[in-house]
Each structure stands twice: as C-alpha cells, then as structure tokens.
Amino acid sequence: MAEAKKSGKASKTFVWILMAMLILGLGGFGVTNLSGSVRSVGEVGGKDISVDDYYRGLQEEMNAYSAQVGQPLTFQQAQLFGVDRNVLARLVTTHSMDAETSRMGLSIGDENLRRELLTIPAFQGLDGNFDRAAYTFAIDQAGMSESEFEDSVREETARSLLQGAIVSGVNIPDSYAQTMIGFIAENRDFTWTKLTEANLTGPVATPSDADAKAHYDANIDAFMQPATRQITYAWVTPAMILDSVEVDEQALRDLYAERDAEYNQPERRLVERLAFADDAAANAALDQVRNGQTSFENLVEARGLALSDVDLGDISKSDLGAAGEAVFITPVGGLAGPVQTDLGPALFRVNGILPARATSFEDALPELREDLAFDRARRVIETQIENVDDLLAGGATLEELADETDLELATIDWHAGSDAEIAGYETFRNIAAAVTESDFPQIEELDDGGIFALRLDGTTEAAPAPFEDVKEDAAAALKAERTVKALGELVTSLEPQLAAGTQFTSFGFDANEEVDTERADFVAGTTEDFMVQVFEMEAGELRQIPTDDGGLIVVRLNEITAPDQSDAEISGIAELITQQLGGGISQDLFQAYAQALQVAYPPQINQQALNAVHAQLQ
C-alpha cells in the first residue's frame, strides 16, 4: 500500500510535466524529422535516449535561460552556455537508472498505474470522469503510443523509488545542529582593560643604538624593503589642466538653471501618514491620541504596519496637495487632520521641519565652475588621445611625449603598497604589476578621464633596509617589546586576585564591561583577533593579549551563556542546519551513485543524430 502511494505521487508529477510539454506543442518531433529513420541519439544499458526527449530537453533549458536573461536564446548561445551538454548528461543519468531498475525488476503494477491515470485532470471529461478520447488524443499528439506513454510512467515511478531509497536514509544527529548553534549563538560576558607604559611604576628606558642594532639583526624580516619596479610614466588628468580650461559665464548660468532643484529647495516637512477607511474612524483615532489613550505608534502597529510603512520622508507643501496647508501649520510632534487624500481620510504626524534653502548663482559659482571645468578638461584630454597614440606609434619616447603634449613626466619605485597619487588608480596598478622591459608604452585611460603611458626601467629585489634608515623604528619596536614584557610581569603578579574576581579598578585600571557579546562582534580599541581569543577562553580565565602599539590588553571571562534551545528562533535555525546538511549529503550520495551507474552502463552516443537535432534548432 505504501509503495503504491509513493509511486502514485511520482507518476502524477511525471504526467503533469508531460502535459506541459504537450501544451508547448513539442510532441512528434522524432517521428517525421531526420528523414524518419533516426529515432534515438544514443543508448544506455539497452535504454534508448529518444530524439524527442533530447529535443524537448533542449527546448525547456533554452526557454528557462531566455526567461532569466529576458530575451530569446539562440542555439549557438545555448551551446556556449553548455545547455546541450547538460541536457545530454541528465538524460544519460536517467536512462542509466532505468537500466538499473530493469535489472532489479523494480516497477509498479497495472492496478497502480490505472489508478493514477484515472485521477489525472488532463484526462478527465466535463463530468470529472476519465475520458478515453481525451487520453488517446493527448498521447497521439505527443507522438507516442499508449504503451510507450504508460511505459514511461512506469520508468519514471521506478526511478523515483530508486532515488528515494538512495537519499531517504540520511539522518543528521541532533548533536550536530546543537554544536553548530552553540558555536553561532553562544554569548560571552567579560571585563577588559588596555594597559600602557603609564600603568607601570616607572618609564621604560629608551634602548641604546647597540640594543636597537641587536634587535634589528634578530628581527631582520620586520625591516625588509619590498621588491620594487622602477617605472617612468607620462600622464595627465582633468585636475592637472583645470587652470587652462576656459568656462564662459553663460554655460555656468545654464548649469545653474539645470540644478535649480538642488540649489533652491522650498521648506519641507518630515511626515508620516496613516490613512483610515472613513472620517469616523480617523476622528476616533485622533481623539484617542489627544486623550492619551493611545499613541500614533500604537495606531500604526494595530494596523499591522511599521513606521517605515507610513513614512513619507521629507516632502514639500505642494507635494501634499490638499493636506499641505494643515500639515505645514502643525508643530513638530503634532498631528494634522483628518484630511481627505487619495487613500481616504488620513492623519499626518510631523517629525521635523527642514527650512527652505536658497543658494544664489554667486554662491554656487565655485562649485559650478569646478564641475564644468572638470567636464571640459575630460573632453580636452579625449581629443588628445589620438595624437598621443600616433606619437607613440611613431617611436616617440615618454620624454618626448611630455615635451610635445600636456602629459607630465614622472618616475616611481612601484610596489603593491605604494602610496603615490598615480598608484591610487587601479588601471595603473594592474599595468605596473604586469609590464615587462620589452613592452612598448601604450596609452591607457584612468577612471577620472585621465590618460597615461608607462615604461619599466628595471626592478629591485626585496632586501633589508639599511639600519641607519630604520634605526628609530628598531628602537621603538624594542621599547614596545620591553613595555609589553613589563606590563605582563605586573599583570602576572596580580593574576591570582584578578582571576578570583577582584575588580580591575581596585588596581587603578580602567574597566570595560561587555555583556551578551557574540562571536561576530567587534570591540573598539582591541586587536583584530580579540573576540576569537575571548571565545577560546573558559569562564573565570584571565588572558593577556599584546597590542601592536606596545600595550597589553587584559581580559577576564566572566560568564558563558549557552543558547536557549527552546527558543523558537534557535530551534528554527537548528532545523534549517539539519535540513541543509541532510540535503547536501543526500545530493552527494545520489551524484556518487549516478556516476557509478554510468560506469556500470557506459553510454553510447550517436554524434550524427545529435548533430541532426542541433540542425533543427539552428
């Protein structure tokens, strides 16, 4: 009985898919096309992959892609996307499963098949009963005989039973989801402070040159100069030629007129609107607010809305129509109305007043001049690109280019961390990283409308910086190291009392209390890995975390709060985790099984038949 129900459900699904294909008018392709002789594009384990199935599969995939991109998809485009290969791979998988179900003798009986056919609405007449003529007509239009159709239903059902047997036994233990929830949703309460040299009883001595040199030698990797590329470049940007660009006053006034709405804005209000079914309901709501029986927020919430749903933003008097007068005489925090609107009578709450703003042409002139000049400078550069290209093509050097054009010559020792102005452009960085000494300079465009060309003159490998150049850095690093050590010794001497719960302030330390922090939170003033370390700690543990600037963070974990497994949100997340993992494992199992079947039943593909089908779609 259980098998019959399961197979019935699968059969019904298959038949509905088949009927959708019939409606699309795709049936009968393989019977008359391809000179009437080619009926399959291959076979798997004795199961033919029919031309009709392959053709319909291609059409369905192409229609799906077309729906996604919003325009028809040609077959050539479909081949570029791999649609034909995907369809063939899917058919090979289903037919290898058919071969396996045949070997196993897995199928449904005639009675179960009959019961399903009788219940399919597409095969029923106006009286709701099975219509033999409708059934015969539909099957005939699909280019199939009744026996072929019924065999396909049996095969689909058998495949569903086989696939269900493979994937349905995956059970994920509850402990997995609970462990994941524990990792995601646990909270921590802790106390922390940052100690510096000022917390010591005396200052840390400044290292001598000899000590700094010893630290430099012992930590030479920290004082390396990066590998650099010596690059000569010529460039020009709109900002570099702004002073040479002329802008006439009429163009400035035209631009000011275009931006009138930006420079001259009327007085506006920050307004919320709540509409009602009739005047009586609106007046009753207004009386309740004025009498203190409720609030505007409660009225909104009672309607199943959020304040964001009724927020009109900043709006002018003219935008409010008939409600403008009432709203603009209402003080901040007050209610206006009821006023008739397109949505019915409504109450308006005023949350703020934005005064009118008027910017004269003279006041806007500097901004207008800069914007207009910048735009014209870009166009000037655009007109020079062809000339600069011709000069480079004719063998001009970057130095000659700078002499004959607006481009300026410069050099840079470039590396990934360079902070020179031109290194801020992504285009320059990409080309600087890839250029070789044999490459000829070419004009490239920058994001702001500028252009440049560059030449690689040489490279320098990474090497230690000379001690004299980094002597102060080495001394500062050594002093920071000694400071952290001294602070650590101080904290270690106080650790028994701090771990026992003595307040940080008892020792003159600042104390920062953090409650209900999550793993993904960031605490300002701490290190990048601070929260990672906190979540590694046990309750009551005290930990010292050095900082890059010679300080020491001391943190004490006060409490670990486990997630409430009975909370609806937590249990929902746990269920989702279980479903996703189970679905992933099931999919992996099925894919592994399908690959094994294809080894057991190697597909034999007729490439000529495939080409013939493809020709029909050109």
Image (cartoon, rainbow, N blue to C red):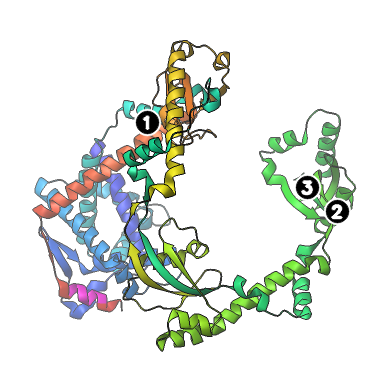
Position of residue 425 measured from the top left corner of the image (x, y, whole percent)? 49, 64
Q: Identify the amino acid type marked 1.
A: Met
**Which residue, given by chain and number where applicable, does mark 2 sit on?**
324
Q: Is residue 509 above or below residue 481?
A: above
Depth check: give the residue in front, 7 or 124.
Answer: 7
Q: Is residue 56 left or right of residue 300?
A: left
The mark lying in front, picked from 1 and 2, is: 1
- Please give the name of the residue rendered at 21% of the width and 51% of the height, measured from the top-left corner: 154
Badge 3 marks a residue whose secondary structure is strand
**Pointer 1 or 2: first along the chain:** 1
Position of residue 267 measured from the top left corner of the image (x, y, whole percent)? 84, 55
Q: Look at the magenta stretch and give its main secondary structure.
A: helix
Span shown in magenta:
609-614
Position of residue 510 measured from the top left corner of the image (x, y, whole percent)? 58, 22
Asked where in the image residue 515 lies, by quadrant, the reply is top right
**Which residue, given by chain and number where applicable, does mark 1 sit on?**
180
Query: How far apart, in angstroms, are the residues tagged by discs 3 and 1?
Result: 45 Å
Q: Residue 57, which numbered label?
A: none
Badge 2 marks a residue whose secondary structure is helix
Cβ atoms under marks 1 and 2 closer than 8 Å:
no
Crowd rating for badge 3 (residues with CA inside 10 Å; few <14, some 14–19, many 20+): many
Depth check: give the residue in front, 401 or 617.
Answer: 401
Can residue 99 be seen here?
yes
The mark lying in front, picked from 3 and 1, is: 1
